[in-house]
Image (cartoon, rainbow, N blue to C red):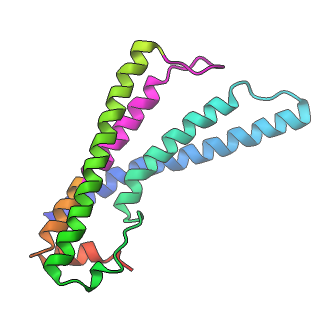
């Protein structure tokens, strides 16, 4: 059961990870074409900087859940690896729970930002692109990250008594 849930989370994270890769490629191509047009033809792409900013925002937020699924975020486990099993997972679980709470608060902030952006009709300066769709994207990816952090927190606390969970949690520890 736990393994199946892990696979579901990883597939969802892989999907948004793919969006992150697409964003990087799009930013690279946009900036490459903008530099060529500017240097060769003296015709820069209007709003290229704004588009790069928005793509970067989407790329970063999409990569957060993917990084969590791949256990790529930095965990300082140097000391707790030497703790007894219960204490090791209890301390690590509390730290993960705090990260989960922070992520949930960030998600809530993104939710508020959507409606504030709509209310104030916030747009980009040059291309006049509304910002709320980007905040919706941020909100959705932050929900994914928060759910993954919550699930990982549960698995960490289960690791106190469950060997499969203990192996799953500690396999990314250096």
List x then y, in percent, for residue 174: 39, 80
In the rendered view, does 85 fall on the left or right side of 44?
left
Asked if residue 159 lies left or right of residue 75, the reply is left
Q: Judge by depth and name the residue closer to the eye, 94 or 125.
A: 94
The residue located at (69%, 42%) in the rendering is 29
User: Relative to 75, is 83 above or below?
Assistant: below
Q: Position of residue 27 (x, y in %)?
A: 63, 42
Q: Position of residue 134 (x, y in %)?
A: 46, 30
Q: Can residue 117 be seen here? A: yes
Q: Residue at x 34, y 37 (%)?
A: 140
Which quadrant of the view contains residue 163?
bottom left
Up/down of 65 relative to 114, above or below: below
> Can the viewer see residue 6?
no
Q: Residue at x 17, y 84 (%)?
A: 84
Q: How many marks?
A: 0
Quadrant location, the N terminus:
bottom left
Q: Is residue 80 above or below residue 31?
A: below
Q: Position of residue 23 (x, y in %)?
A: 55, 43
Task: Please give the name of the residue rendered at 49% of the width and 40% of the height, measured from the top-left corner.
Answer: 58
Q: Is residue 75 magenta?
A: no
Describe residue 119's horizontal placement relative to residue 122 as left or right. left
Magenta stretch: give its range. 122-149
Residue 127, magenta (yes or no): yes
Residue at the far left: name it. Answer: 161
Q: Quadrant of residue 46?
A: top right
- Residue 33 vs 81, above or below: the answer is above
90 or 34, nearer to the observer: 90
Magenta region, mostly helix, strand or loop?
Answer: helix
* Quarter of the view holding residue 173: bottom left
């Amino acid at each position: 059961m736990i393994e199946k849930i892990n696979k579901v989370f990883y597939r969802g994270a892989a999907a948004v990870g793919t969006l992150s890769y697409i964003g990087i490629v799009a930013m690279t191509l946009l900036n490459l074409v903008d530099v060529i047009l500017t240097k060769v033809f003296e015709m820069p792409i209007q709003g290229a900087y704004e588009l790069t900013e928005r793509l970067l925002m989407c790329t970063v937020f999409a990569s957060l859940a993917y990084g969590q699924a791949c256990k790529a975020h930095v965990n300082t486990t140097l000391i707790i690896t030497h703790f007894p099993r219960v204490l090791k997972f209890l301390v690590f679980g509390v730290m993960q729970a705090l990260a989960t709470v922070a992520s949930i608060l960030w998600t809530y902030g993104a939710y508020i930002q959507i409606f504030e952006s709509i209310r104030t009709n916030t747009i980009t300066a040059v291309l006049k692109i509304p910002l709320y769709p980007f905040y919706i994207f941020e909100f959705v990816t932050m929900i994914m990250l928060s759910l993954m952090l919550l699930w990982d927190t549960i698995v960490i606390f289960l690791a106190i008594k469950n060997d499969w969970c203990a192996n799953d949690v500690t396999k990314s520890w250096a």
